[in-house]
Amino acid sequence: MKNILIILLTFGLAMNVSAQMDNSFTYQGELLDNGSPANGEYDIQVVMLDGAAQQVGVTSQHNGVQVTNGLFSMNVSFGIAMFDGYENYYFEVSVRKTSVGGAYTTLSPLQQLQSVPLASNLVNGNATAGQVLTFNGFQWGPATNPSSPWSVNGSEIFTNENVGIGTNNPVPRLHVSTTSGFETARFNGGSNMYVIFSENDVFRGYIGSYQTPSGSITDADFEVGTSAGSTGNLHLITGLNQPRLTIDPDGLVGIGSTDPQANLMVEAPAGNTALRVRVDSNTKLTVGSNGGTALGAFTTPPADGLYVAGDMKQPSSSNGMMKYMVEARCNGASTSITKYYNGVDSNSVTTTAVAGTGICRIHFPESLSNRYFQVSPISASAVSANCHNNTTGNTDLFCFVYNSNTGTGIDGNIMILVY
């Protein structure tokens, strides 16, 4: 061929990382025929030479390569086992026009192979399908443990083995270890980011920001919660299997109880103080181990009773602190209850007819023997009243209203206070 041919070449190596490696590669170039871009079919031979100008492998023969506006592409292979990455290799390219035939024209200068450093054939490294590969400084080969723990499911990968990060001896499924003294792990996401905890594929709870921000929940909030429609409780536990705080699905809170019966229920074992409230380091409210309550000071209250340090006061608009308060009409056979307060009603405090002017008998639902009572007439001056308690069971008061000057009975109203 009399025309001078100039060829500019680019190429790339493609590895298939498996038990076998395809050592062919794409060879692209620009072919000029007598200084102009070539068109038509050309036969091209490519020979690889080493640094001593000795041929390596076989000649890569390509007949009828289509060249368009000087550009062409073909797949070159020399049938060699590997490129070791240390040898200098060169391409010697020869070209002839297919329609003309005859001798090839060898192009110069030689084209140097710019190979991927240390590219190797995996078969030469004794690798087989499914193995994990490591690099020994010269070539790739099977890892010490040739069986990969990872499996592929579509676009997902998974393993049934324990995974260690920062440790080579993972104990749980995921074991993260660090000796740096800083955070061990971090979970980062956008709004409503949360980590779910499931049991036997049932959603039990979450940590994060699961709820959509509303009037009571904002993006700045952090949550520990259970799933919607959950029938289980949320527990705070210390000491392994020692529930300390429980919130049930209805929002009832139990301290020391896993079955709260109120918005807040405190359950203390025998001998423990159930509740203690302090103000400025001074105890102001105590529910003691004996069932009693102390207000205003830290002291042992009476068993099942109430101890108050300081005055007990009520606003004038509030009712007094007594057991019963009754207004009765002492009128012999027509005695009646006209007013009552503090739990008293017509069914709990009643009257019995007694003959005689100004005399009445009033029944209370419990014994009055250990209680104090006070009786006052509700009338004009010079009227007095008194009551006594001497019935079986001590549940009745016998009362008499009379003229304080003459002692004569007078029908009238009396007020009875029982403390």
Image (cartoon, rainbow, N blue to C red):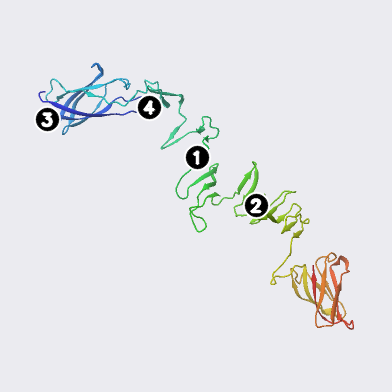
Q: Describe residue 223's horizontal placement relative to residue 316 as left or right.
A: left
Which residue is rendered at x = 69% and y = 53% of the image? 275
Q: Residues within 10 Å of mark 2 (few under 14, many from 20)?
A: many
Task: Decide which of 91, 178 is in the foreground and name it.
Answer: 178
Residue linked to disc 1: 185
Which residue is rendered at x = 71% and y = 68% of the image? 314
Q: Is residue 68 above or below residue 271?
A: above
Residue 18 image label = 4
Q: Nearer the viewer, mark 2 or mark 1?
A: 1
- Separation of disc 1 and disc 3 at Cα? 64 Å
Residue linked to disc 3: 35
Amino acid type of the residue that numbered disc 2 sits on in the rendered structure:
Gly
- Work out whether mark 4 precedes mark 1 in sequence or the reverse, and give the earlier one: 4
- Separation of disc 4 and disc 3 at Cα? 44 Å
- Work out whether mark 4 precedes mark 2 in sequence or the reverse, and give the earlier one: 4
- Separation of disc 3 and disc 2 at Cα? 93 Å
- Work out whether mark 4 precedes mark 3 in sequence or the reverse, and give the earlier one: 4
